Structures are given as C-alpha cells and as structure tokens.
Image (cartoon, helix red, strand yellow):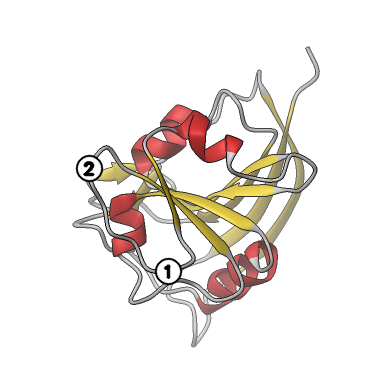
Amino acid sequence: MITLIAAVAENNAIGKDNLLLWHLPDDFKRFKNRTSGHYIIMGRKTFESFPKPLPNRTHIIITRQNYDAPEGCIVVNSLEKAIDSCPANEETFIIGGGEIYKQSMAIADKLDITKVHHSFDADAFFPEIDLAEWQLVSEEFHAKDERHQYDFSFETYLRAAK
C-alpha cells in the first residue's frame, strides 16, 4: 500500500523556501506514529529540510543529482525505483515534496492528510484531491489551542472503487 502523508493548507500549500508553514505538535506526533518502522519516500529537498534522518524509518531519497546521503538512506533517481526499493507487502509512505506528491498521486492507495484550516503564501503545493477518485473515510477536527495556532483536521482518503 502506498500512502501519501502530508499537512496541507486550505489553498493546498505545504511549504515555502523548503520550510513548513506552521507548527502543529499533534500533527508531528501523528506523522511519527504513522511512519515509524516504515519506508518513507521523499525528494532531496524534503530530506535536506530535516536536521538529520528521522529515527526508526528507512529513507528513500529521489534525486537526479549525485547525492551523498547519510548511511542507511537509499538514493534513487525516479519514483519507480523508489517504490521498487520498498517491501511490496508493507505500507510505504510518500512524504513530499510537492513534485513527488504530484508524480505519485496516480499510484497512491491512501491519503493521510492533516488539513490546516488556513491559507498561506507558499511555493510548494499538494495536488488537488479529486473527490471522483478519492473517498473521505475518516475526519477528526481539532480546534486551535495554546499549542496549535490553527484549527486542523486529520483526514483519511482511500482510492474510490471504479
């Protein structure tokens, strides 16, 4: 199963200048819980936005450049090779950025979205979710509070039957 996991603003913004646009501790916790122990696929810029590799995950980095990644990371030059590097019988997570999400939307089985109920100025965006292709199967709203500057919802989509 291929799952795209992302925090996405109302205007589909996901980042600017290779940085996140918000700080939502419950979203970070959900991301960690969902992806720990799994393969995670990302573009080089997304990988470089982390201070170090995320613990307890196998990182697959897609880049067309010669790239000297830290030990334990797998470097490939295409989404197809990234997916081929993952165990076929396990859930694999695609974690960004915008171009990788765009390339993988057609092959994904599931979307784990944190919808941030605000619009942002951005230079990276998540693809539009076509509700003819995706079915919202769960939604959990969280109001802003002292730790979360914005309202947000955890949304799970499965590919709709054809």
Label 2: element kind: loop
Of mark 2 and mark 1, the one earlier in the sequence is: 2
Of residue 125 and residue 66, the one placed in the foreground of this image is 66
Left or right of 20 on screen, residue 28: right
Please tell me whether residue 23 is drawn above or below residue 119 in the rendered image.
below
Image coordinates of residue 43 in percent, x first then y, are: 36, 47
Q: Quadrant of residue 89?
A: top right
Number of on-image labels: 2
Please tell me whether residue 67 is drawn above or below residue 152 in the rendered image.
above
Residue that lies at the very extreme toward the top in this rendered image: 162
Q: How far apart in space, not on screen, are marks 2 and 1 (Cα)?
A: 17 Å
Of residue 142 and residue 107, the one placed in the foreground of this image is 107
- Nearer mark to the viewer, of 2 and 1: 1
Q: Which mark is residue 65?
A: 2
Of residue 3 and residue 41, the one placed in the foreground of this image is 41
Q: Which mark is residue 42?
A: none
Q: Which mark is residue 71?
A: 1
Instruction: Give, as a three-letter code, the residue at label 2.
Output: Gln
Q: Residue at x 28, y 59 (%)?
A: 68
Disc 2 packing (10 Å; few <14; some 14–19; many ≥20): few
Image coordinates of residue 99 in percent, x first then y, are: 35, 36
Quadrant for the N terminus, please. top right
Q: Quadrant of residue 133?
A: top right
Q: Residue at x 33, y 76 (%)?
A: 51
Of residue 17 and residue 81, the one placed in the foreground of this image is 81
